[in-house]
Structures are given as structure tokens and as C-alpha cells.
């Protein structure tokens, strides 16, 4: 199963410096992992001392973690930088803004599943408190954080239309959440994890419930085009197309072809569990697609009268007719164990794919 990856980018607060002795239990990214459960993978890309400011030696970009985070395949990114930028020798509002803009743009350009931009949440950093002697640990400036960083992150969120996770408000009345006024302790990390969970849970649930486009159609169609254009063999081309669909579509358990022979649909190349070998025109989802001459998008196969169950795990299905010179010669059939797996968008893409096959299967 494809896990939803949540990449958390930030400084020592994200790394878990305040709870380093029990980091895997208490750092907020690990707490969040337990709250989200096994369907999600929370990755910690926090590094001590990192700032956003462009050109600064401790910049997050220079650490190399940005590149690693960009290549982790996450659908969800959480970015929190700013606390270290308030150090006197680093602070420069312009450079902070530029640095944040650069990181934000890199993340938003980093298309993931289905060619969609990832969801990026900006975090307002937790408040900072002075120690007993009145100084602030690590030369971090509580005033700059409150008066500059927090409003700037809000402005950036507006500029890019990004959601905010407000750790500032969640912590500003809680000096007891900290080790030395800058790094959250276990209680502070728990409060952060709870705030993050509250703000991202709804977004993450869209992966589980509603139908999602979970296919890299750009790669899929380009691959099918390239592979079938080169190869003159009809069956080999169908076999490779089934393999490519299986490779590039998430959440499916069967993908393959039925081809019309002697007035019936006969099983062709496929990927998945063994399937029924003959289907009458007009029966099942496949036979209906042929009889009606149009794609069948079935969100719940158990409600489709006449559905033929091959793999008992299947709950939704899409069947696209394949044509040669306008005449149907077979169907592409894809099954999923999830209800409502296939959308109108899938139909559009798969009908386009059928068009590519039509062009490339019947070369002289
Ligand atoms: N469910 C199909 C039969 C083929 S299997 O899904 C592979 C149908 O009702 O036509």
C-alpha cells in the first residue's frame, strides 16, 4: 500500500533537540507518526541551527536536507524555519523572505503523485521565552520572532495561498513547554504534535476517502506511447501496457485486456490474479462496455447488476472500449479494492491511452 508521506522540514525544534535523550518517543514528528498511524509515514527533515535566510552558512538549503526532502516523494510538506533567523548576526527581513520564497517555490514545483503539486503547510514557529537571567538562549530574539517572523510567515502564506499551522498561538502562554525558552520539552512537543495533527488530519483523510487521482498519467502515457511505437507485436504491446498500468497506478489489483473473438470477450494479457476467460457481450462490466460502446465507471461493483467477480478483493472498476477504425475489438479493464477508486479524470486519461493503443497496435 502506498503510504501518505508527510515531510517535516525545519530546524532543531523539528529535529527534536529539546528531547534529544528520548527523541524517538517525544519529538513532535514521532508523536505525530503515532497519531496518524500506519497509513502515513512522517519523515523528519529537521536540522539543528538551520535558518531560511538566503546566503547564510547555516541555511537550510546549504544543509542538503532540502534536496533530500524534495526527493522523498511526499504528498504533504510542513515547513518551519525562522527561529534561528532572528539571531542578531543573521537577521535580515529581506533575506529571510527571499530564502523562504525559494524553499516554498522548490517544494511547490516538486510534483508528486498524479502530477499534482504537494500540499504545503507553513508553520508559525513556537513562541520564545527569556531564561531566568533575562537573556534568550542561543541569542534567539523573542521580539523579532513575534514582530517580524510571525507576520512575515503569515504574509507568505497569503502570497502563495498556503494553510498555516499556528504553533505561535499554541505556545505563547506556555513557558512551561520549554527546556530553556527556545526548545520545546516533551509537553511542548506533544502540544505541537496535537496542533499539527488537528490542522493536517482533514487534508490527509482526503487520501483515504474520496476518489483520488493516484496515477502519474504523464509517465504512463509517455511510456505506453514509446514502448508500443517501437514494437510491432500486438500481444506484446498489450502485455507491456498492462505492466505499465500496474506499475504507475496506485490502489489497483487487476489491469488487463479482453479481446473480442468469435463474438465473445476472451481474456488477453493482464496483471493480477487469474480471471474468467470468456465474457458474453452484454454481460458484466466488460460486456456492457462493448454493448453500450462506452466506458463503464463503476464505483461499487456489488451494485452493478451482472458484475462478474474475478478477484473477490475488487470493489470498483473501470472498463474502456478499444477500437480499430471505429469498431470495438476489445476492452481495457482495471479493478481496485477501494470503493470509488476511479474518477472522471481517470476516464479521460484512460480513453486517451486507448487512443494511443489504437494508433500503435495496428501498424503495418
Ligand atoms: N469484473 C469484470 C470481469 C473481469 S475481471 O474484473 C478481471 C466484469 O464484470 O466484466
Image (cartoon, grey):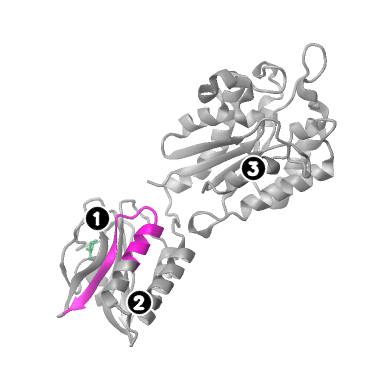
Residue 64, numbered label:
3
Q: Secondary structure at mark 3?
A: loop
Query: Mark 1 = which residue?
Result: 302
Please provide percent x and percent y for residue 119.
58, 48
Relative to 124, 15 lies left or right: left
Image point 65% across, 47% down: which residue? 162
Q: Nearer the viewer, residue 233 or 293?
A: 233
Residue 11 in the image: above or below residue 221: above
Q: CB of residue at label 2: within 8 Å of ligand 1?
A: no
Task: Tell me where the magenta segment starts and ends, as one range.
Answer: 241-261
Q: Is residue 252 magenta?
A: yes
Disc nearer the start of the sequence (3/2): 3
Q: Nearer the viewer, residue 31 or 362?
A: 362
Crowding at dot 2, Cα within 10 Å, few <14 / some 14-19 / many 20+, comes out as few
Relative to 273, 172 lies left or right: right
Please provide percent x and percent y for residue 346.
42, 64
* Nearest to viewer (mark 1 / mark 2): 2
Alpha carbons under labels 1 and 3: distance apart:
50 Å
Disc nearer the start of the sequence (1/2): 2
Query: Mark 2 = which residue?
Result: 231
**Quadrant field for ligand 1:** bottom left
Image point 56% across, 41% down: which residue? 7
Alpha carbons under labels 3 and 2: distance apart:
42 Å
Q: Secondary structure at mark 1?
A: helix
Residue 138 in the image: above or below residue 58: above
Residue 173 in the image: above or below residue 151: above
Alpha carbons under labels 1 and 2: distance apart:
38 Å
Q: Nearer the viewer, residue 356 or 364?
A: 364
Relative to 306, 88 lies left or right: right
Amino acid at each position: 500500500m502506498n503510504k501518505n508521506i508527510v515531510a517535516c522540514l525545519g530546524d532543531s525544534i523539528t529535529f527534536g533537540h529539546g528531547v534529544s535523550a528520548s527523541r524517538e518517543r517525544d519529538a513532535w514528528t514521532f508523536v505525530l507518526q503515532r497519531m496518524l498511524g500506519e497509513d502515513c509515514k512522517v519523515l523528519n527533515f529537521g536540522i539543528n541551527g538551520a535558518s531560511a535566510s538566503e546566503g547564510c552558512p547555516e541555511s537550510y538549503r546549504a544543509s542538503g536536507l532540502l534536496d533530500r526532502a524534495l526527493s522523498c516523494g511526499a504528498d504533504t510538506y510542513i515547513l518551519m524555519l525562522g527561529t534561528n533567523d532572528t539571531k542578531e548576526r543573521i537577521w535580515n527581513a529581506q533575506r529571510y523572505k527571499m530564502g523562504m520564497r525559494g524553499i516554498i517555490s522548490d517544494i511547490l514545483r516538486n510534483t508528486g503523485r498524479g502530477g499534482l503539486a504537494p500540499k504545503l503547510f507553513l508553520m508559525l514557529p513556537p513562541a520564545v521565552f527569556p531564561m531566568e537571567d533575562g537573556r534568550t538562549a542561543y541569542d534567539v530574539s523573542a521580539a523579532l520572532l513575534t514582530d517580524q517572523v510571525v507576520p512575515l510567515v503569515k504574509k507568505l502564506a497569503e502570497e502563495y495561498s498556503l494553510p498555516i499551522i499556528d504553533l505561535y498561538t499554541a505556545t505563547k502562554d506556555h513557558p512551561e513547554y520549554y527546556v530553556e525558552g527556545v526548545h520545546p520539552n516533551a509537553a511542548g512537543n506533544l502540544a505541537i504534535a496535537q496542533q499539527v495533527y488537528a490542522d493536517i488530519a482533514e487534508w490527509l483523510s482526503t487520501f483515504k476517502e474520496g476518489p483520488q487521482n493516484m496515477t502519474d498519467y504523464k509517465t504512463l502515457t509517455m511510456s505506453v506511447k514509446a514502448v508500443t511505437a517501437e514494437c510491432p507485436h500486438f500481444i506484446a504491446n498489450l502485455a507491456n501496457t498492462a505492466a505499465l498500468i500496474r506499475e504507475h497506478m496506485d490502489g489497483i489489483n487487476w489491469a488487463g485486456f479482453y479481446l473480442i473473438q468469435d463474438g465473445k470477450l476472451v481474456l488477453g494479457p493482464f496483471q493480477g490474479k487469474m480471471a474468467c476467460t470468456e465474457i458474453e457481450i452484454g454481460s458484466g462490466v466488460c460486456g456492457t462496455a462493448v454493448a453500450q460502446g462506452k466506458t463503464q465507471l463503476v464505483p461499487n461493483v456489488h451494485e452493478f447488476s451482472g458484475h462478474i467477480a474475478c478477484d473477490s478483493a475488487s470493489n470498483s472498476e473501470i472498463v474502456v472500449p478499444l477500437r480499430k477504425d471505429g469498431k470495438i475489438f476489445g476492452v481495457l479493464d482495471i479493478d481496485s479494492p477501494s470503493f470509488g477508486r476511479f474518477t472522471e479524470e481517470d476516464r479521460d486519461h484512460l480513453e486517451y491511452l486507448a487512443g494511443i493503443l489504437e494508433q500503435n497496435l495496428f501498424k503495418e
